[in-house]
Every structure is written in C-alpha cells, then in structure tokens.
Image (spheres, helix red, strand yellow):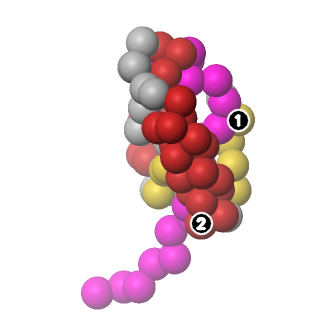
C-alpha cells in the first residue's frame, strides 16, 4: 500500500454559512484533502450553552493547530 501524506485543511468562518461549509468540504474532500470544520453551527440554528461555546472555540483552535492550511468561508 502506498503511503500518502494528505493535506489537512480547517474551514473557518461564520457558522451562519452552514451550507457553504458543507459545499466546500465536499469539494476539498474530492480533491483528496482531509477537511476539519465546525461540528456545531450555532448561528445556523444549533443551540449551545455559553460553556459549550467556549469549549467549541478551544476545539476549533486545536483543529487549526493540526492543519497545514485554513480555508476561510
């Protein structure tokens, strides 16, 4: 089996654009990239507490740390 080094990309931007995030994730995935994006879209209707938002923000920063690049939606 060939060993490949896949690029890891984190999508960043306002979570009110959930559909655009999903569209870009699909394109980049088909391009052979590993895509990280928010798993919760608070501004698109997902309900989160203030404590959860703080943890989600920290989690997103760790995703950025893991990435080779970011893509701003």
Residue 7 among those drawn in magenta: yes
Residue at the image position 47 percent from the left and 14 percent from the top: 44
Image check: 64 left or right of 48?
right
Where's residue 32, x and y in %? 46, 56
The residue carrying mark 1 is 72
Residue at the image position 46 percent from the left and 78 percent from the top: 4
Magenta region, residue range: 1-19
Residue 52 visible in the displayed image: yes
Residue 64 among those drawn in magenta: no
The residue carrying mark 2 is 66
Where's residue 12, x and y in %? 65, 38
Where's residue 65, x and y in %? 66, 64
Closer-to-camera residue (3/36): 36
Please rate how many residues cluster around mark 2, counting C-alpha atoms within 10 Å: few if below 14, some from 14 to 19, many from 20. few
Q: Quadrant of residue 46?
A: top left
Classify the position of the C terminus by image quarter.
top right
């Amino acid at each position: 089996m060939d060993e490949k080094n896949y690029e890891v990309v984190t999508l960043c931007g306002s979570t009110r654009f959930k559909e655009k995030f999903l569209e870009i994730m699909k394109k980049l995935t088909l391009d052979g990239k590993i895509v990280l994006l928010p798993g919760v879209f608070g501004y698109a209707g997902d309900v989160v507490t203030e404590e959860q938002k703080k943890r989600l923000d920290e989690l997103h920063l760790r995703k950025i740390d893991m990435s080779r690049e970011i893509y701003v939606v």
